[in-house]
Image (cartoon, rainbow, N blue to C red):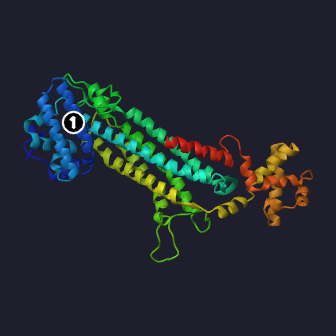
């Protein structure tokens, strides 16, 4: 049987394989709320403009409410023969209210309809991410406040570099997530324009009011070019791209959590709630949640690359290729949401091991820069020379098998005779971090202040 929604010029129905490759209902059914909201706004506008009667519009609205109720209750039967969510909803509307349903599609096409649905969906997703990321930032900022003075080694090349505080490290991620939120907010601004009324591609001859539907759907304004409107998927690409960057940030924290929780590092203890045991090795506690967060960028970047590839070289305007935008995007967004939630749980529960971190921070000559700075400040040595002298002192400590604070004064003076016992003050990790008071530096009082500032901001 030919399609009852558009089969006027068709004698035969589609081949089974055609139906399978063509149908999107299996995945676009999750757009039903957005689809129905778009239809309600459209019908109301058509009535206001005198394009359909007020009573037809009222019937349509009531019918759409019923359809939405059926989908929400799980009593709606989706049909693959009806291809997608748009035709499934419209066909059921016809069962419910009769011929008036046929007036809903006046001055509209599935091309602008799907653009509306997906923009609304992606906009909701962005709002959801924003809320989730804010929660994660708060969890990190609260850890930072509690551990503003907890000393840990800061790394470069994963080699101990200089002592920092655990709070400072937590706040580094708060900053990254702030940029992620701002990237998503930017994408939201550009996406928040109303596609409805672009119709198939050329606009319509009916006297529609696109400003009206824009307002009803919470869009800032209508889009300005009908061809661009039905051909555009930038809003998905941008959101996926911001999502991918965010996923990468999460994966870096996840990797640190994996490293920190090893028995070699023992910097943090993860909770039972976010780890698993081994079925064979009873002693094990595996950081599975962190490992999965570390892995998630694979599919989120995959989603972005997949849609970039679909869109590349597509001539204007709509082509069915574009139906391939949804599955990867849904998968990418679902997984980012899961990754943010898991990270928030891990961060809240994780307990830093202060002794281990301090011990590690004091190892590996981590206060060598403080020593060089002391030589510059006290002996007015040029920094390059101070760097060289410190290098010799580190080499000496290495031969002696001790750390810098354990190097005796006579030994130090054998390298640089002007060194006094005053130098030992800068060699402790506590003094080292306390001295880093430059704006954005790791000094506990800076970190405390920053953490408090973030907490206030995030709770406001
Ligand atoms: N299911 C389609 C999609 O997701 C809706 C638009 C169909 N438009 C069309 N002209 N066949 O892109």
Q: Residue 326: horizontal and vertical position, in percent?
A: 31, 46
Residue 296 visible to the viewer: no
Q: In which quarter of the image is residue 194?
A: top left
> What element does badge 1 sit on?
helix
Q: What residue is rendered at 26% in x and 38% in y?
A: 114
Disc 1 beta carbon < 8 A from ligand 1? no
The residue that mark 1 highlights is 39
Residue 146 visible to the viewer: yes
Q: Is residue 437 left or right of residue 256?
A: right
Q: Residue 353: horizontal and vertical position, in percent?
A: 62, 63
Q: In this view, does 348 lie to the left or right of 83?
A: right
Q: Residue 331: horizontal and vertical position, in percent?
A: 36, 51
Q: What residue is rendered at 42% in x and 45% in y?
A: 129
Q: What residue is rendered at 15% in x and 32% in y?
A: 57
Tally of numbered tags = 1
Q: Specify few, some or many for label 1: CA neighbours under 10 Å numbering under 14, 14-19, or 20 or more.
A: many
Q: In this view, does 421 lie to the left or right of 300?
A: right
Image quarter for ligand 1: top left
Q: Residue 103: horizontal and vertical position, in percent?
A: 13, 32
Q: What residue is rendered at 54% in x and 61% in y?
A: 258
Which residue is nearer to you in this view: 450 or 410?
Answer: 450
Q: Is residue 7 left or right of residue 149?
A: left
Look at the picture and state if 268 lies above or below 60.
below
Which residue is nearer to you in this view: 395 or 342?
Answer: 342
């Amino acid at each position: 049987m030919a399609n009852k929604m558009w089969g006027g010029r068709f004698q035969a129905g589609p081949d089974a394989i055609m139906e399978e490759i063509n149908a999107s209902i299996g995945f676009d059914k999750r757009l039903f709320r957005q689809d129905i909201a778009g239809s309600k706004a459209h019908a109301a506008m058509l009535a206001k403009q005198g394009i359909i009667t007020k009573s037809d519009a009222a019937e349509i609205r009531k019918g759409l409410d019923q359809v939405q109720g059926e989908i929400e209750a799980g009593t709606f039967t989706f049909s693959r023969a009806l291809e997608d969510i748009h035709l499934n909803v419209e066909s059921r509307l016809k069962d419910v209210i009769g011929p008036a349903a046929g007036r809903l599609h006046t001055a509209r096409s599935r091309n602008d309809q799907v653009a509306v649905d997906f923009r609304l969906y992606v906009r909701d997703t962005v709002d959801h991410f924003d809320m989730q990321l804010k929660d994660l930032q708060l969890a990190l900022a609260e850890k930072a406040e509690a551990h503003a003075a907890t000393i840990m080694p800061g790394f470069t090349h994963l080699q101990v570099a200089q002592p920092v505080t655990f709070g400072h490290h937590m706040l580094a991620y708060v900053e990254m997530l702030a940029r992620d939120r701002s990237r998503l907010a930017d994408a939201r601004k550009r996406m928040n324009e109303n596609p409805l009324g672009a119709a198939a591609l050329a606009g319509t001859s009916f006297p529609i009011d696109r400003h009206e539907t824009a307002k009803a759907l919470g869009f800032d304004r209508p889009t300005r070019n009908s061809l661009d409107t039905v051909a555009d998927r930038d809003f998905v690409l941008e959101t996926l791209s911001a999502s991918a960057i965010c996923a990468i940030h999460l994966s870096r924290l996840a990797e640190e959590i994996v490293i920190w929780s090893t028995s070699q590092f023992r910097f943090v203890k993860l909770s039972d709630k976010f780890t698993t045991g081994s079925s064979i090795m009873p002693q094990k506690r595996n950081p599975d949640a962190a490992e999965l967060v570390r892995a998630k960028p694979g599919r989120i970047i995959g989603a972005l690359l997949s849609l970039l590839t679909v869109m590349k070289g597509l001539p204007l305007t709509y082509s069915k290729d574009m139906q391939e935008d949804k599955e990867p995007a849904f998968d990418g967004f679902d997984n980012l949401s899961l990754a943010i939630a898991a990270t928030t749980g891990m961060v809240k529960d994780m307990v830093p091991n202060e002794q281990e971190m301090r011990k590690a921070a004091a190892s590996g000559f981590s206060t060598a820069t403080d020593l060089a700075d002391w030589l510059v400040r006290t002996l007015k040595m040029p920094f390059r020379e101070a760097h060289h002298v410190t290098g010799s002192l580190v080499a000496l400590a290495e031969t002696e098998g001790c750390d810098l604070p354990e190097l005796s004064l006579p030994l130090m003076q054998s390298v640089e005779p002007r060194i006094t016992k005053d130098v030992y003050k800068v060699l402790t990790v506590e003094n080292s971090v306390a001295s880093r008071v430059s704006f954005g530096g790791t000094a506990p009082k800076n970190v405390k202040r920053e953490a408090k500032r973030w907490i206030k901001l995030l709770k406001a």
